[in-house]
Image (cartoon, grey):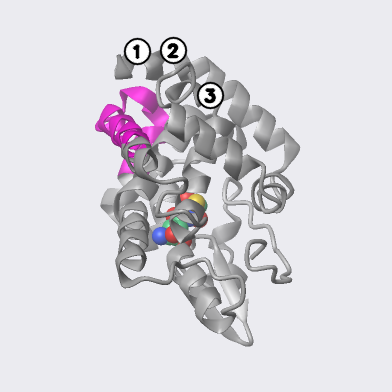
């Protein structure tokens, strides 16, 4: 919304306290996940669909490239994010940090946990429970972290050929990837690209952080105590993550 220079009103849903399961939120999104856009009475979930809608409804300050080729390249990034990177990000965030917050807030019994997120399906919910209970020792945890790292390498590869992920203009591909690199940064895992490991990703993220949209998108809404907790938990887990990738 900041990149499109559009005004909007944000409503914070504390997913670590289960606010996504409140009836008033389930009425907006029965899948019990954020974000959701409500515009002129229309309810739109799914980050990529929200961005596509905003682009279609408000064409000024375009976030999609003009050519068919580059638009397809952008969509390959958003598809990959939706299908692979988002689940990997969810895993690493729970494994490294959210599990500590949820355990402190009280996760309750497995049966309650399963019921609370019935829409997610038993398999997905059971997996999340394992991340919360066992952290890095949960089945498949290491693979998710390797997949995340693989995406950083793919970014490095793309940035060898252009300033932004697709072409010379900042686009939806950069918008789609920025939260995932920012999440690693929030978890104190910048070591995944700094120190000469992935220099183009490092430069790209510095350019993202210098944009006017960065503060409203990533900093302003984030509760300071959660940011501090994620950083501290991330610092504790970093040696284990680094060892996994060596
Ligand atoms: N594909 C969806 C994924 C939405 C999603 O998983 N959101 C997470 C936060 S990033 C959530 O609300 N999780 C709630 C929970 O874990 O119970 C999108 O891109 O919007």
231 vs 132, nearest the viewer: 231
* Magenta highlight on residue 203: no
Mark 2 residue element: helix
107 vs 237, nearest the viewer: 237
Q: Which label belongs to residue 239?
A: 2
- Residue 202 is situated, as x and y percent measured from the top left of the image, at 50, 30
- Residue 179 is situated, as x and y percent measured from the top left of the image, at 52, 47
Q: Is mark 1 within 8 Å of ligand 1?
A: no
* Magenta highlight on residue 134: yes
The answer to which image quadrant residue 24 occupies is bottom right
Rate crowding at label 2 as few (under 14), some (14 to 19) or many (20 or more) other CA atoms within 10 Å. few
* Residue highlighted by disc 1: 243
Q: Magenta span: helix, strand or loop, mainly?
A: helix
Q: Is residue 189 above or below residue 60?
A: above
Q: Is residue 31 above or below residue 56?
A: above
* Residue highlighted by disc 3: 234
Of the 4 image quadrants, the one containing the C terminus is: top left
Contact between marks 2 and 3 (CB within 8 A): the answer is no
- Residue 48 is situated, as x and y percent measured from the top left of the image, at 44, 65
């Amino acid at each position: 919304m900041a990149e499109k220079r559009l005004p909007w009103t944000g409503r914070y849903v504390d997913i670590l306290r289960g606010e996504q399961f409140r009836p008033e939120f389930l009425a907006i999104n029965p899948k019990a996940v954020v974000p959701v856009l409500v515009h002129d009475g229309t309810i739109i979930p799914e980050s990529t669909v929200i961005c596509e809608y905003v682009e279609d409804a408000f064409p000024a300050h375009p976030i999609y490239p003009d050519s068919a080729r580059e638009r397809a390249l952008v969509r390959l990034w958003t598809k990959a994010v939706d299908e692979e990177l988002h689940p990997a990000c969810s895993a690493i965030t729970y494994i490294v940090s959210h599990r500590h917050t949820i355990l402190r807030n009280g996760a309750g019994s497995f049966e309650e946990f399963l019921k609370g997120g019935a829409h997610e399906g038993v398999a997905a919910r059971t997996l999340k429970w394992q991340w919360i209970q066992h952290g890095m020792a949960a089945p498949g945890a290491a693979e998710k972290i390797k997949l995340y790292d693989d995406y950083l390498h793919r970014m490095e590869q793309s940035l060898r050929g252009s300033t932004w992920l697709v072409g010379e203009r900042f686009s939806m591909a950069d918008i789609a990837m920025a939260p995932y690199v920012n999440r690693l940064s929030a978890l104190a895992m910048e070591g995944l690209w700094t120190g000469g490991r992935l220099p183009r990703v490092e430069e790209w993220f510095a350019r993202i952080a210098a944009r006017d949209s960065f503060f409203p998108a990533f900093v302003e809404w984030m509760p300071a105590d959660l940011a501090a907790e994620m950083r501290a938990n991330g610092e504790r887990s970093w040696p284990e993550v680094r060892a996994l990738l060596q």
